[in-house]
Image (cartoon, rainbow, N blue to C red):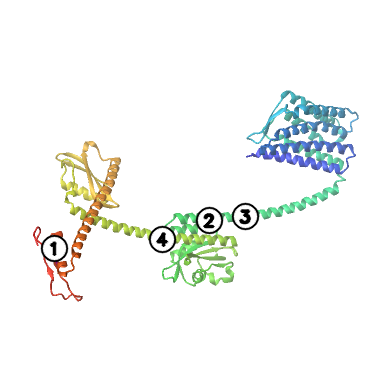
Amino acid sequence: MPTSTFWIDLAAYSLTTLVAAALLLVVLGMGVRRPLNLSFSLLMAGVALWAAASVILRIALWFDTGTQQFWMELSTLAFMVVAPLLLIFSGIYVQAERSWPYWVSIGSLLLIGAFCVPLFRHQVIANVLLDAGGVVTWNRSPFLSWVASAPLLVSAVLALALMWRERRRLQEPYLLIAFTILVVFGTVFSIVTLPFPTLSLVMIVVISIMGYGVLNRQLFNPLRELTDRLEDQVAKRTRELEETTDELRQAFQRIQQHTAHLQAAAEVARSVSAIRDVDQLLQDTVRLISDRFGFYHVGIFLLDDPGEYVALRAASSEGGQRMLAQGYRLKVGEGIVGDVVGSGEMRVVPDVGEEAAYLDNPDLPQTRAAIALPLKVRGQLIGVLDVRSTEAGAFAEEEVAALRTLADQLAVGLENARLFAQSQSSLDEMSRLYQVMAGEAWRRFAEGRPDLRRYQVGAAEIPEETWSSLFAQARAQGRPAGLRYRGAGGGRHMLAVPIKLRGVSIGVLGFHRPLEAGEWQPGEISLAEGVAERMALALENVRLLEEARQRAARERLVGEIAGRVRASLDPDVILRTTVQELGRVLGARLVAVEVTGPEGDGGGPLSGEGLEPGGEE
């Protein structure tokens, strides 16, 4: 991207072009028959051509087109022509008695014309670039550069000498100052390239001084009417510019307000998506709206379950905090908030003076305008957003639209928080039920497998009651527990790690080692916990597999019994088969079946037989 140096340079050259062209047109308008006017017009034409070529050169470098070389060469040629034209103008201006200034100028122009051949064959200038600092750089032939600089320097110095010699007679300091600046800086820039656009800035100063000097001395009176007309036009344009500036300032302020509104909406949206706690969500929302919009008071009311009252749940102002502490609430239909609850529509009061009784609240005495917006979810009202301002007519259309968006986002956030709390409660309840069911299942599994109650590797060097106490501590805490044991066989570092399955302790893993081995380190405990976790999953898989096998066996037996029962159509045979199969499967000493009527008034078992374990029918 172009730098500030580039833009300064481009602006200076553009301004030079405009000033030179303007001076050219003004002088031409006064008549070209006068030699002074004609010479000054030629000088301004040369300056305008040089500055315009410089402008086009920089634009070409910016857009990286293929014409940079040509415009650089044209700019160089125009700059060289300026010095002979300056000498001609100086001779006419001082009314030189001899003609040598004109012959020197003609000779310089001829040399410059001959210099055009190597110049436009690209033998003088090459590699025209725009460096990182925004300055135009190029490579040039030293010999040819000095050849080209000779007529330039000679003409410029002679022009300055003429003006200096006639300074007392002419009493024209402006042209003398301009010529001096031009000669000094023109000489410098013919030799070196500076990293800052000094030439363009110097040239606009020189042209301005020269133009003022010439117009003030030669054309001031004839241009008085034109000057007045131009001043009127400038004043008119100035007024128009001031009006445009005011409109732009107001538009910028509206854009700033709109941007602030969008930022507030975005922050509320982020809070809605991130916060699940209702109180925190409400407090963050009132704070954001108050800070971003600058309102006097922002409050949020929520409707109670019976739907009779709306209670204030969050407020940004000091008066609102007092209302919160008092448990402030309104009945449906009471005040602006209750009115919104009853109608379900937004309510705006641009000037409290018109409805003072409607908004009377001693805790909010500075209220001058108010707006209340319904908080709705799927068409159902759940609360009201109450906003107060200290300025009458404060709620513009843009602010109302932004507040509508915020109210909708807040309602969605409140509903999401409610659903999240409900889901969390359900998950907690399911987790508690699972823990109870899992604990009961493992209790039954352990009772059915007494061989799994305790497993040990190595000799029992520590008493059973010590292990039992440590295991109980680990199960109660739900985390590893350690103990330093000292017994007759030597001291031991003991560690008990609960085997937990989704929060339920189904066992304990115990370790011990000699005291000289050191205490159990966090890394070792973490490793043991990881092993215990995977062990719990493996044991759960075994238990589930065992349950599945038992269930399959049970279903198979039920199917076999049902098949034998269905094989007969005789009730007595069906009953006898049932008790025989149940007795055989269950190992019961007696199985009895009693068939009763609808009222349960059977007279005793219709069939009751059983089998002794291992016996026969």
- State the separation of the CA atoms marked 4 and 1: 56 Å
Residues packed near mark 4 inside 10 Å, few (<14), some (14 to 19) or many (20 plus): few
- State the separation of the CA atoms marked 1 and 3: 96 Å
Q: In the rendered view, does 10 fall on the left or right side of 338? A: right
Q: Nearer the viewer, mark 4 or mark 1?
A: 1
Residue 58 image offset from top left, x and y in percent:
69, 37
On the rendered image, what quadrant is the C terminus found in?
bottom left
Give amino acid for label 2: Ala
Give amino acid for label 4: Leu
Question: In this picture, which residue range is highlighted in magenta?
Answer: 576-581
Q: Nearer the viewer, mark 2 or mark 1?
A: 1
Q: Nearer the viewer, mark 1 or mark 3?
A: 1
Instruction: Pick whichever of labels 3 and 4 is earlier in the sequence.
Output: 3
Q: Relative to the observer, which residue lies in front, 426 or 583?
A: 583
The residue beneath circle 2 is 264
The residue beneath circle 3 is 253
